[in-house]
Image (tube, rainbow, N blue to C red):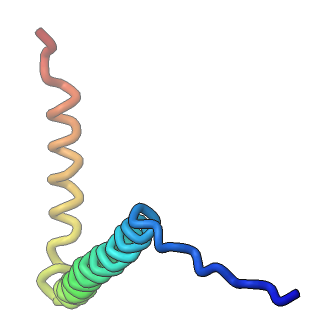
Amino acid sequence: MPEHRVEPTPDPLSERVVELENERDALQAELDAIANRAVGQWLTAEHFGSLAVSAMEQTLSWKVTKPLRTVRSAQLRRGNSQKPTS
């Protein structure tokens, strides 16, 4: 006896679920791309900022004034610790 294959009728609800899952995946991919661009831009800015700070710290002026900055930081810390509390 030959078997008759009955094609299942498409379920509109199942089709809609598949469509929504595909849309979700596409939106997630778009969100990931946007987040990756933002992180990439931040890392680039951070890299160039750290290069600028490193270059500044290598200058003669920065090296000469280092002891003065150290003393001033100590003065500020001591001044903050001696303030009267209300």
Identity of the residue furthest to the top in this view: 86
Q: Is residue 23 above or below residue 69?
A: below
Q: Using the image as rendered, state which of residue 14 and residue 30 is in the foreground.
A: 14
Task: Judge from the rendering whether residue 39 lies leftward or rightward of residue 17; answer left or right.
Answer: left
Residue located at (16% from left, 63% from top)? 68
The percent coordinates of residue 80 (x first, y second) are: 17, 32
**Is residue 43 visible to us here?**
no
Residue 45, image quadrant:
bottom left
Q: Can you say which quadrant of the picture contains the N terminus?
A: bottom right
Residue located at (42% from left, 65% from top)? 17
The mark tally for this picture is 0
Residue 69, image quadrant:
bottom left
The percent coordinates of residue 67 (x first, y second) are: 22, 66
Q: Can you say which quadrant of the picture contains the C terminus?
A: top left
The percent coordinates of residue 76 (x first, y second) are: 15, 43
Identity of the residue furthest to the right in this view: 1
Task: Judge from the rendering whether residue 6 lies leftward or rightward of residue 67; answer left or right.
Answer: right
**Is residue 83 visible to us here?**
yes
Task: Judge from the rendering whether residue 26 lies leftward or rightward of residue 83; answer left or right.
Answer: right
Q: Using the image as rendered, state which of residue 79 and residue 18 is in the foreground.
A: 18
Q: Using the image as rendered, state which of residue 27 and residue 84 is in the foreground.
A: 27
Residue located at (18% from left, 25% from top)? 82
The percent coordinates of residue 53 (x first, y second) are: 20, 81
Residue 42, image quadrant:
bottom left
Residue located at (15% from left, 53% from top)? 72
